[in-house]
Image: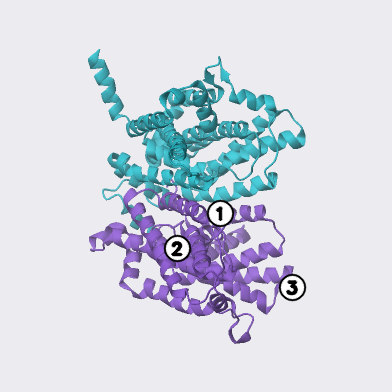
Amino acid sequence: MIDTLKNSFARLRRSSFFAGFVLFIIALILNAALQGPASFFSIKSINTLFAKNAAFILVAIGQSLLLIAGTMDVSCGIQLALVNVVTIMTHQVWGIPFGLSCLLGIGAAVLASIAVWVCCSVFRLPALLASYAMTYVIRGVNVMIMSVPQGKVPREWYMAYDSQLFGLIPVSFFAVLGVLLICRFARKTPFGSHIYAVGGNPRNAFAAGISPVKVQLKAFLLKGVIVGIAGLCLTLMIAAGNPLQAEDYGIRSLSACILGGLGFGGWGSVASAVFGSGFFVLIQNSVYYFFSLLVRMIPGFSVSSYWQNFVSDVIIFLGLLMTIVTAKGRQEVLREGIVRQFKRIDYRKKPEGLDGKEAASHE
Amino acid sequence: MNSTQSTLTLGQRSKLFMQNSPARMAFIIAIILYAVTVMISPGSFNASAIGSIVMLTLLLSIASAGQTIVLIGGGMDFGVGAVMSSAAILTTTIMNSQDGRFFPLLFAALSMGATVGLLNGICTVKIGLPPLIVTMAISNVITRMQYVLTQGSPMGYASPSFIKSVTSKLFGLQFLPSIILYGLIIIPLVFYLLNHSRFGKQVYLLGNNPVAARLNGVNINRVQILTYVFSGMFAAFAGMLGAAYMNAARCQIFDEYAYNSLIAVIIGGTSFSGGVGTYTGSIAGSLVMVVLSNLLTAMGLAQPTRNVFMGLIMIVLLILYNREKKVRQ
């Protein structure tokens, strides 16, 4: 019994998401301590936590798939707003049932993903920059569709999203669970191992008969669907339309994945994304309770929303800083991946790691 | 068949020209764009319109000076916009419409820029994540700080003499705004830094091949961090001038300069991969950006269409200059 425990602990320690897992547990304890365990573990508080952050967790999961496949997409934050805008506007202007609008919203996210895929995989542009440029394009499209924040969601829809199944499990939890099951299933298919091959080394994958472009297309399609679901979660949560929201989800999801233990390409698992995003969510929640604790303890102390935004951005930054610790073991993998994201470098591995660049720049 | 082949070679030739002398190419593009603008709205061809083009081009050139250095060194600075906005807010707050506070302001703004640059540099080098992500995270923090410190609405105005030193017309000529005098200090300084100083040579070497640079005894971390420090300082100075041009400041006033300076620098032929690029190109690229924005205004395009346009331009630029090699060769 103790041996099996020991073994499973050793397996956990070796896994790629161990650092993210530890951070997640720390954040959980911190949050529970600040909020009071009884209040934190109540059904209501967990429901709110899930309902508010399901979108972010889902985006991080989608992002992790892309990172494993050796590419990325910083525009998926603004894609959430695209889903939001399309869903609300098709329902409002065309008068179609809300369920159908939701499907159209998911379709919009898939289309946006395909556009990013065309830039990154077909045109072979550096993913980070190309998807950042796509942020501008999608932002423009959003405002064209909906010029000012407006619209609303049918009451029964957002009430349903906010409720708990069997009075216990929040509905938003099922969205996350469903997506995780899809990922789990995809991992078992050939596609599940192909994305690791392509992310690790596209050239070798190609030589082994796997088409990197096709595999990345599948990854982008899956990510499009996930972002679509995330966008619906966001829409149901705020129950209104806003063309310019959630833009920072893109970069936040990226840092959550990296924090959770994902590298660039062929490394890590979806669990890293879950733990990394969970860490972010819990820390942000803790900050809120920390501030309200301060307000209660120090009379005359008040916090503006500016302060909360400031602290949450500082946390994102500190999270990135923390990757120095979590990523230490994988520095080499990371660095190679980074070089690939940025520079026209030969994919063949060289002993020095960076000197393939010279060959590329002398062509 | 024959004709398609000749157009192909023409296309190849023009591509070669673009890749070999992007600065000249950018100047030609700017002239063409301006000609189109004048054709669309003939009223825009006058001395004061040209004056405002000169003004904005110089502002963007100064902002993109640091970006050029950072890109040549193989990094990327997304903090330019946030630093400019912060410097603009510092300008209006410190000056508060009173003369004689230029030098304290200069000191405060430059040290702010240098601090942010140092932070950018150290974090980029030490974390080892893509500089885009790191500098973006830092610039978000700085932007939030603007709101926290000013409660969302910065006070004050730039001092009258400072405004005059930026916006008055030289010799009474409408197309010569006096920001040119500042340009005459900054532009030679950048040229000296990049082309004639030891630091500049090290930056090129670092961008071209970090391993070789390190083996040649260059302290690559220090040089890389210094590029970010310079970027922060140039951005801060541009922010001061921008505040004088705009008279008052608000939070995030110059944030778009982060993206614009990046595009301007790339139009000018500086590559993302580092080691290649000139400041002349960046100035030409800035001119293209300003003229293009004038053209979009003349065509009556609204903000969303402009956003789409800017994104597509970036993608086209990436396709022209920065494609990765095929997997299959």
Q: Is residue B90 left or right of residue A16?
A: right
Name the kind of residue labelled 3 in the image. Pro
Find disc 3 in the rendering and name its residue.
B42
User: Which mark, by number, is residue B67?
Assistant: 2
Q: Quadrant of the N terminus of chain B?
A: bottom right
Label 3 to label 1: alpha-carbon separation: 40 Å
- Of the numbered discs 3 and 2, the one sitting upstream in the chain is 3
Chain under disc 3: B
Question: Which residue is painted at 69% across and 27% down in the image?
Answer: A155
Name the kind of residue labelled 1 in the image. Gly
Q: Residues within 10 Å of mark 1 (few under 14, many from 20)?
A: some
- Of the numbered discs 3 and 1, the one sitting upstream in the chain is 3
Residue A2 versus residue B296: which sits nearer the camera? A2
Question: Which residue is painted at 53% across and 33% down in the image?
Answer: A55
Q: Secondary structure at mark 3?
A: helix
Residue A192 percent across, percent down from the top left:
43, 28
Question: Which residue is painted at 23% across and 63% down in the image?
Answer: B217
Give the drawing colour for chain A.
cyan
Give the drawing colour for chain B.
purple
Label 3 to label 2: alpha-carbon separation: 34 Å
Q: Is residue A329 visible?
A: yes
Find disc 1 in the rendering and name its residue.
B152
Q: How is the image coloured?
A: by chain
Q: Secondary structure at mark 1?
A: loop
